[in-house]
Image (spheres, rainbow, N blue to C red):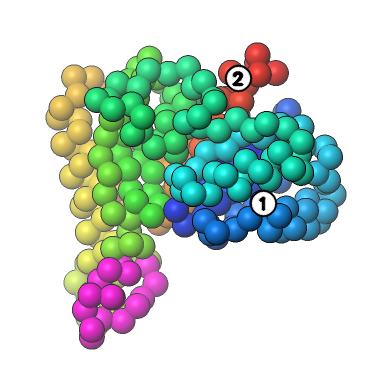
């Protein structure tokens, strides 16, 4: 069975695939100081609750945007799964063209999403991943990574607003019923939510104006569901892009097994 680890700046996903389907998924807050042994204690308890054990895991793939965590995640695989993991950006062959000026700068998550999206959706694509940052990536019809846009994430923007303005409270992000807020909280929620919808729609429009073919827009990521139904500019919401991409990369590197 495969253990897939997808680590973002905010959360880390651990998922188990049995060769046919994903049978378990867990999330933990990303902590770059967490050791391999600490991961193992946490993960062994969750495996046990799902009726699984470490000794059934015989493969591991890791995608991380937190370089200082890769050492400990790699050691988790070596010590407790007794396998050398595939690591995106190190020893994993992706099988796609990366058409940017400095291919080594492309984030692991963005490349994995490109593969996951290309497997399901036809033609050139825009993949929007909403997390700590919001990325807009263009994927060519042949699956090549063409580059994109990186903007601050919606949660980061809300935190910055609270931190920088002494009289503005920390508030939950949600979709307001109206744009014009009648109190401070409502005005902040409207500004961040509808401001992000305007950012998404504006960047989609500008990206499309630079691309010679029609583009299908796919949204994924931890907070993408907030925007579901709020904009006609997004064609599909797909929460499984990343783990689908990780599974495909594992297959490409293991001879299709």
* 2 vs 1, front mark: 1
Q: Position of residue 4 (x, y in %)?
A: 63, 38
- Most extreme residue toward the bottom is 167
Per the image, label 2 sits on a secondary structure element best described as: helix
Q: Is residue 77 above or below residue 224?
A: above
**Residue at position x 15%, y 27% in the image:** 210
Mark 2 crowd level (few <14, some 14–19, many ≥20, 10 Å Cα)? some
Give the quarter of the image for residue 114. top left
Specify whether 28 is left or right of 225. right
Q: Position of residue 118 (x, y in %)?
A: 44, 24
Per the image, label 1 sits on a secondary structure element best described as: helix
State the residue position of label 2: 253
Q: Is residue 125 visible from the viewing direction of this image?
A: no
Count of labels shown?
A: 2
Specify whether 236 is left or right of 55. left
Q: Is residue 70 visible from the viewing direction of this image?
A: yes
Give the quarter of the image for residue 57. top right
In the foreground, 108 or 244? 108
Q: Position of residue 200 (x, y in %)?
A: 25, 47
Is-magenta flag for residue 30? Answer: no
**Residue at position x 37%, y 17% in the image:** 97
Q: Position of residue 128 (x, y in %)?
A: 35, 41
State the residue position of label 1: 36
Question: In the image, which residues are magenta?
Answer: 158-173
Mark 1 crowd level (few <14, some 14–19, many ≥20, 10 Å Cα)? many
Q: From the image, which quarter does the C terminus lie in?
A: top right
Is-magenta flag for residue 167? Answer: yes
Q: Earlier in the sequence, mark 2 or mark 1?
A: 1
């Amino acid at each position: 069975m495969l253990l897939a680890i997808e680590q973002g700046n905010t959360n880390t996903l651990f998922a188990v695939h049995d060769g046919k389907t994903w049978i378990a998924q867990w999330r933990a807050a990303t902590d770059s100081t967490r050791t391999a042994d600490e991961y193992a204690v946490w993960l062994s308890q969750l495996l046990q609750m799902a009726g699984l054990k470490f000794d059934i895991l015989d493969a591991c793939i890791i995608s991380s945007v937190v370089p200082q965590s890769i050492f400990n995640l790699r050691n988790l695989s070596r010590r407790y799964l007794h396998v050398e993991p595939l690591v995106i950006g190190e020893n994993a062959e992706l099988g796609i063209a990366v058409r940017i000026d400095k291919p080594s700068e492309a984030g692991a998550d963005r490349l994995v999403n490109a593969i996951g999206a290309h497997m399901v959706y036809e033609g050139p694509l825009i993949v929007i991943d909403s997390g700590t940052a919001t990325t807009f990536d263009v994927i060519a019809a042949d699956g090549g990574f063409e580059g994109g846009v990186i903007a601050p994430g919606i949660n980061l923007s809300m935190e910055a607003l609270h931190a920088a303005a002494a009289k503005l409270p920390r508030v939950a992000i949600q979709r307001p019923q109206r744009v014009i807020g009648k109190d401070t909280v409502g005005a902040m929620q409207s500004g961040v939510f509808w401001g992000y919808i305007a950012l998404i729609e504006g960047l989609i429009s500008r990206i499309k104006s630079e691309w010679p073919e029609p583009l299908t827009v796919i949204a994924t990521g931890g907070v993408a569901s907030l925007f579901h139904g709020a904009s006609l500019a997004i064609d599909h919401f797909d929460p499984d892009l990343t783990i689908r991409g990780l599974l495909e990369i594992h297959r490409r590197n293991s001879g299709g097994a």
